[in-house]
């Protein structure tokens, strides 16, 4: 065998789809990594009588070149005919009408015989539909065999703002590239990669995550996307005054969450300033505190040694940034704690725990006003500014649109231009 023939065989791949039921096929061989497979038959399994239809649909093929489509059929003893229609990317690329006898030389109700559907290779196929409509009783489909070659390797150009960050090529077709992370900037935090380029948007865009493989359908460009990091600093109450707080366990980064359960426990969750379930109105009166869940208006209190949705006067231990709520029942102190182990359920919850109040990691975290997140492909610009082309006009005068810190945004000849102030 000549070297070119050996190379051709190496480059060719085969996938076989065997009919199992009238809605399912099983696959063998090699196929694109995220292929979508669907099969339907209006009668039983692969049986196609007159006017019955069987369809195999393949999607996400990644631009393969289809070399051969072969369907294995048998018929009745003296009959069985139909029409094949093959579509690639929604367009008809082949048809074949007739009977099994016309296709293979004779009818056969015992052996499945191969019938080829295309006469020449068809490139750049992402979707493939093979439909058989019966015209005379009956044809029986055993399996579909598709011989194809992989798409050529693709190149992905990665952009960070206006600069090329990296250029990556697949080692071979449909092997994908591993998307890297990009370092954060002072104001912007890297979130992932976008297929589309934009300046500033305020809705989270669809992103490709770093650390995973991306399988391009063609040579393309991806843009690094950053989110403006304006998360509020954690500020703990050092002076007790009524207001809206989160009751937090600083060391474990947990916050009291929601309202009391019927079993006398409460939930805790990772601290999230924007989660209204963690927001509580705390009203101080002399040496007591009253706690109310803001979102539901539910009082947070206790009944015996269990948490309860009742208005209760909590005793307060406070020192520096440490604030701890507790109560005394039958001369015994119980603190409102966020990490209590339930041996029966093998779980942790928030609730009352027998302990004396003292300086602890418990605190009241001040709820900060959340900022509107923004996203950009241009972290080199200050947050909230965008540069756009709005056409050119030679007679348009230069003027300053706005000033932000050390930056000025100019309009010159229909183009917005960002400059550093001198």
Image (cartoon, rainbow, N blue to C red):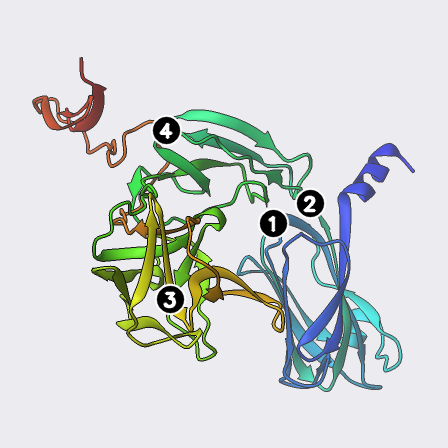
Q: Earlier in the sequence, mark 1 or mark 2?
A: 1
Q: Which residue is mark 3?
A: 327
**Badge 2: how crowded within 10 Å, few (<14), some, or many (20+)?**
many
SS at badge 2: loop
Q: Which residue is mark 2?
A: 150
Instruction: Residue 249 in the image: state x and y as whole percent.
Output: 44, 52
Residue 62: image tag: 1
Q: Residue at x 38, y 53 (%)?
A: 272
Q: Residue at x 77, y 46 (%)?
A: 12
Mark 3 against mark 2, which lies toward the viewer?
3
State the CA–CA distance, disc 1 to disc 3: 65 Å
State the CA–CA distance, disc 4 to disc 3: 45 Å
Q: Which residue is mark 4?
A: 186
Q: Earlier in the sequence, mark 4 or mark 2?
A: 2
Q: Looking at this rendering, what residue extends furthest in the right direction?
A: 1
Is residue 313 visible in the rendered structure shown here?
A: yes
SS at badge 3: strand
Mark 4 against mark 3, which lies toward the viewer?
3
Is 411 situated left or right of 138 in this image? left
Q: Earlier in the sequence, mark 4 or mark 3?
A: 4
Is 49 situated left or right of 340 in this image? right
């Amino acid at each position: 065998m000549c070297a070119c023939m050996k190379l051709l065989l190496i480059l060719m791949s085969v996938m076989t789809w065997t009919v199992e039921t009238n809605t399912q096929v099983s696959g063998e061989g090699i196929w694109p990594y995220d292929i979508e497979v669907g099969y339907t038959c209006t009668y039983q399994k692969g049986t196609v009588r007159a006017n019955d239809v069987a369809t195999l649909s393949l999607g996400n093929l990644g631009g393969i070149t289809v070399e051969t489509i072969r369907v294995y059929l048998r018929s009745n003893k003296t009959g069985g005919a139909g029409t094949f229609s093959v579509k690639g990317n929604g367009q008809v690329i082949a048809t074949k009408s007739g009977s099994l006898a016309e296709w293979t030389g004779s009818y056969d109700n015992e052996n499945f015989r191969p019938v080829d559907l295309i006469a020449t290779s068809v490139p750049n196929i992402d979707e493939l539909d093979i439909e058989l409509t019966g015209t005379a009783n009956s044809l029986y489909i055993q399996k579909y065999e598709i011989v194809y070659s992989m798409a050529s390797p693709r190149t992905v150009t990665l952009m960070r703002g206006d600069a090329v960050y990296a250029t990556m090529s697949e080692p071979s077709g449909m092997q994908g590239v591993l998307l890297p992370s990009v370092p954060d900037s002072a104001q912007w935090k890297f979130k992932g990669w976008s297929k589309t380029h934009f300046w500033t948007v305020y809705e989270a865009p669809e992103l490709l995550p770093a650390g995973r493989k991306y399988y391009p359908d063609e040579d393309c460009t991806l843009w690094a996307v950053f989110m403006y990091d304006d998360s509020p600093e954690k500020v703990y109450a050092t002076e007790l005054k009524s207001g809206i707080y989160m009751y937090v366990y600083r060391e474990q980064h947990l916050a009291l969450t929601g309202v009391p359960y019927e079993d006398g426990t409460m939930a805790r969750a990772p601290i999230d300033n924007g989660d209204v379930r963690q927001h509580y109105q705390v009203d101080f009166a002399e040496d007591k505190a009253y706690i109310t869940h803001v979102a539901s208006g539910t009082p947070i209190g206790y009944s015996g040694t269990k948490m309860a949705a009742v208005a209760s006067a909590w005793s307060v231990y406070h020192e520096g940034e440490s604030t701890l709520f507790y109560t005394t029942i039958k001369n015994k102190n119980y603190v409102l704690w966020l990490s209590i182990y339930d041996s029966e359920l093998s779980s942790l919850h928030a609730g009352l725990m027998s302990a004396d109040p003292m300086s602890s990691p418990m605190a009241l975290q001040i709820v900060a006003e959340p900022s509107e997140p923004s996203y950009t492909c241009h972290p080199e610009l200050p947050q909230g500014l965008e540069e756009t082309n709005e056409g050119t006009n030679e007679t348009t005068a230069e003027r300053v649109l706005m000033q932000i810190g050390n930056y000025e945004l100019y309009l010159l000849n229909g183009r917005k231009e960002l400059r550093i102030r001198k």
